[in-house]
Image (cartoon, rainbow, N blue to C red):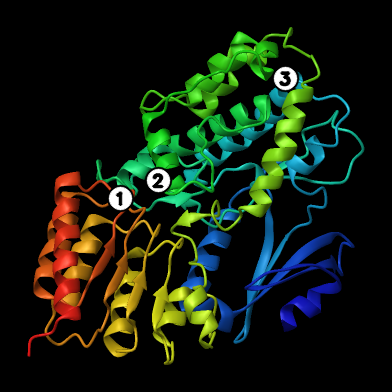
Amino acid sequence: MQELRSSYDTKEQLGKGAYGTVYRCTCRNTGRNFAAKIMEKKKLGEKGCAQVAEEVDVQSTLKHRNVTSVKEWFEDDEALVVVLELVTGGELFQRLTQLRHYSEKTVCEIMHNLLSALDYVHEKGIVHRDLKPDNMLLADKQVGMQETSNIKLADFGFATRFKGRNLEQACGTPYYIAPELLDTAVFKTRQYYKAPACDMWSAGVICYLLLCGYPPFRVNASDPGAKHKLFKLIVRGKVVFNKGQAWDHISDEAKDLVLGMLTLDPEKRLSAKQALHHPWFEKEGVFDVHLQDTILELEQFNARQKVKGAFYGVEAACALLFTTACLQRGVKQPNSDVLDQLLCAKEPLTCLDISNSYLGAKGLDAVTSVFSRHPSVTELKMSNTLLSTEQCVALCKALQDRECQSNICKLDLSDNPLTHPAGRAILSMLQTRSTVTEVKLEYTHISPQLLRKISEQCRVNQSRVQSPRS
C-alpha cells in the first residue's frame, strides 16, 4: 500500500467485489488516470494470491489496443495491488442495446477487433479460456457506436500459456465453453485439449449471439438438469440459422464465418488469423439493415443473464460458490472459498448443500472431511456439481469406510455426468451401508436397469430402518 501511495493519488471508489475494491488513481509523475485494484490477502487465501500473481504475470506481457493492460503491481503483508488501464465505457452489451442503428456491419467491426486481439494474444502463446460478452469492455463513454476500435478484451483470470503443453483444466462459462473442454473435464471422452482453438469456439458463439440476439446452444435455465442438457447440445455442435428471424437479414459470408469458428473438430476450426482473412471482412457490401429483432433479443438475453448469474457463472476451475447450508449455520468466513467454508463449519450442521457449485478434487476431500467429522449431517446435496464418475466412486468408498462416523441417510447426486461404474459403486455402498435410504440420480448417464436396482435397494434399506431387528 505504501508503494501505491507514493506513486499515485487514490481517488473515488469505482467498484467492490468479494476479494477487494477498485479505485480510480492518478499517477503523480504523468497525471494519467488508472484503476487500482486492492485485494486483501486474507480474503484471497494462499491459492487466490497465487492465481492473481499468475494472472498479472500473463496480462503484463500483453500490449495491444484491444486488450486491457496492466501497468504494474505491488504486494505487502496485507494486500495485493494491481494498477490497470482505466476502462470507463462499460460492458459492450449495454452500449449495443442503446444504439439507434445496429446492423451486421456493426457486428463485423466488433468481431474484427475481437479477432485482432485474439490473434495477438495467441501469437504470444496465451489462451484466454473465458471469452464472453461480459469480458468485452469499451474504453470510454463515447457517443454512438460508429467507432468500435475501443473494445477491450478483459479478465485474464483463467488465461494460461499453452505452447508445448496439453491442457486438462476446464474453465469458462457454460454458453461459451468449447466442446473439447467438456469432453475432457465433464464427459471424460478425451484426456486433454490443445489451445488456443477453444477461444475461437467462444468467439464463434459471441458472433452468432451478436448477429441474432441469442446463443446457438440454449436451454431453459429453469428446466431440471438444464446445465447438463446445455452441455450435451454443445458437444453435439449442431448450429442452426433459424428462418423467419434475424438470420433472414444476415449475409451468407457471416454465416460461413460462424460455422468456421463453431467447427466441432478443434484441428479444423478457424484460427484467429484465418478468420481475419475471411471474405466477410474483405467484402465491402456487408448488410447494413437495422436488426431491430436482434436488439430486442439481446436486451432480453442480457436481462436473463443478470438474473441467472448464479446458474450461468464461470464454472470448472473458478472460485467456488458459498453454500447456503453452511451460511445458514453461521460458518466462519476466513475467505470466500467454499472449501474453507466447509472445513471450518461448526455444528449443528444437518444438511450439507453444495449444489450448483463446481466441486473439484479438493472439494470432494473437504466434503468427505466435513461429514466424517460431523455426525449431525444426515443429508448431502451435490446436485449439479460436475461430480465425475471417479469422484462418485471415491465418495462411495468413503461412506463405506468402517472408520467413517457419518450418519448420512439421503444423497442427491442428480444432474451430474455419472456413468455405469458410478452406479455400481452406489449400489455396492447401499448394500453395505443400509442406513442410506434415498439416492437421487436424475439426469445422469446411469442406465435405467441399474437405476431400478439402486431404487430397489433404497426401498430395502428403508424397510430395515423402519423395522429394526429386535
Which of the 4 image quarters holds residue 311? bottom right
Farthest-out residue, left? 470
Q: Position of residue 401 (x, y in %)?
A: 13, 80
Q: Amino acid at mark 1?
A: Pro
126 over 383 or under it: above or below? above
Q: Disc 1 on helix, strand or loop?
A: loop
Which amino acid lies under the numbered mark 2 shown in the image of this protein?
His
Q: Which mark is residue 196?
A: none
Q: Residue at x 80, y 46 (%)?
A: 139
Residue at image position (48%, 20%) is 260
Classed neighbour count for the residue bearing mark 1: other residues with Cα under 10 Å, few (<14), some (14–19), many (≥20) = many
Residue placed under numbered mark 3 in the picture: 104
User: Looking at the image, is mark 2 or mark 1 earlier in the sequence?
Assistant: 2
Mark 2–mark 1 CB contact (< 8 Å): yes
The residue pinned by badge 2 equals: 228
Which residue is labeled 1 in the image? Answer: 417
Q: Earlier in the sequence, mark 1 or mark 3?
A: 3
Q: Is residue 315 left or right of residue 392?
A: right
- Is the C-beta separation of discs 1 and 3 under 8 Å? no
